[in-house]
Each structure stands twice: as C-alpha cells, then as structure tokens.
Amino acid sequence: ENEEEEEEIKVHTFNMNHLDMINPGVEEAQKLKKAILFIDEAKTFMEFYKYQTITHLDFYDIQLFKDKEKMRKKLIGAMDYNQPLWIDMHDSPIEKDIIFKEDEDINKATFPKTLIDYKYFVEEDYKRLMRENEKYGRMRDSVLWVGDHFYFGIRTTKKIEDIPEEFLKKMYILRVIEEEIEEEEED
C-alpha cells in the first residue's frame, strides 16, 4: 500500500545580490533527489547559470516543445552528460500536462512525471525513454544511470501564488527576489 506523506511547502528565498547562497540549496535538492522550482522574481536565472554547463529548454521555442523526439533526446543527453536539465517557462503558466504528458506511445509523451521527485524515477521510466539499439556514452543496454550532477529544474517568473500546489509540494523551491531580506535578530 502506497501512502503519500503530506509534504510541507518550504520556500528558500534569496536576494538577487546573494546568488552564491543558491548553490547549497541546489546541493540539498540533489541529495533529496527533488527537482528544483526556481521562482525567479528578480530575473537572475541566466546570471546564475551563465558559467555552468546545463541543458536549457526554452518554453518560447515552440518548435522544440512540439517535437517530442527532440525533448526526449534532450533529457537523455542531460542524463548521459551528467548535467542539469532546465525548462525555462518564463511567465507562462506551469501546467503538468504541458511538461509531463505520459502516453503509452512514447512519441506522444514528453517527460515522465517522476522527474519532479526523481527518487521515484525508476528503470521502467528510463526504459520507456530509450529506443532499441540506441547507445549513449554512459547509458548502454537500457541500464539506468543518473550521475550526481544531473537534476531537473523548472524556472518561472510567476509569483508563488500563481504556481499549482502539486508543483510546490513536490519540488525544492528556490525563490530569488530583488529586495533585501531582513535578518531576524536573535535575543
């Protein structure tokens, strides 16, 4: 029997002038094997990632999002090269069916829903992504291999109240704001 725990929504907020503080959050999310929801109110995402190797999918690239085969290859490539995969939603609504549409016919599917909380990303999900005789560097013979540097993230400029709760509950939330965060004084 599979009982789901009620997950508390926890938001890790940073000021745009302290982007160096984001790395520990990314590392914690990786340890928890959770995807990251980057709420980018300060619009600093590219500043943070400009010197890092990532696979970046831009939601405004409509042709890419219509081409499920390219999307599949981007996911497999990010896993194979052991690098983060980010979907940049900009100010578009974050909807599960846009990003995670599963279908028995893999050509109609996008990403497995288990990427949000990828400790549940299992061999079966992975095998559905692979094609017969397809060989990648580290991924051969349909063996699931996910390195320490791979993680999945969604970047949005939406306010937290505009994001569906199912994403907020399952993802590790990093929020970057423009205004200074006041430190609470200890007594």
Image (tube, helix red, strand yellow):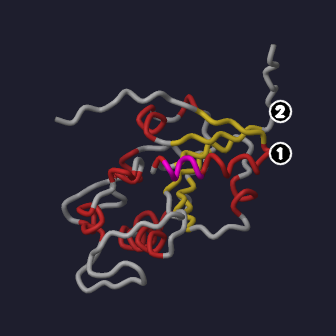
**Dividing the image into 4 quarters, which one contains the N terminus?**
top left
Residue 140: percent from left, percent from top: 32, 81
Labels 2 and 1: the sequence-earlier one: 1
Which residue, as the protein is rendered here, is positioned at the far left? 1
Reading the image, the residue beneath label 2 is: 180
**Numbered mark located on residue 6 in the image:** none
Assess disc 1: are there few (<14), some (14-19) or many (≥20) residues with their C-alpha within 10 Å of its C-alpha: some
Is 180 positioned to the left or the right of 78 in the image?
Answer: right
Assess disc 2: are there few (<14), some (14-19) or many (≥20) residues with their C-alpha within 10 Å of its C-alpha: few
Residue name at image x 55 percent, y 31 percent = 10
Q: Amino acid at mark 1?
A: Asn
**Dividing the image into 4 quarters, which one contains the C terminus?**
top right
Residue name at image x 33 percent, y 56 percent = 121
Look at the numbered discs 2 and 1 and tell me whether their residues touch, using CB distance below 8 Å: yes
Q: Is residue 51 above or below residue 135?
A: above
Q: Amino acid at mark 2?
A: Glu
Reading the image, the residue beneath label 1 is: 17
Task: State how far apart marks 2 and 1 are (Cα).
Answer: 8 Å
Q: Is residue 172 above or below residue 136?
A: above
Residue name at image x 48 percent, y 35 percent = 168
Residue 34: percent from left, percent from top: 46, 48
Q: What segment is highlighted magenta in the picture?
A: 27-31
Instruction: Looking at the picture, tell me which residue is in the foreground, 93 or 47.
Output: 47
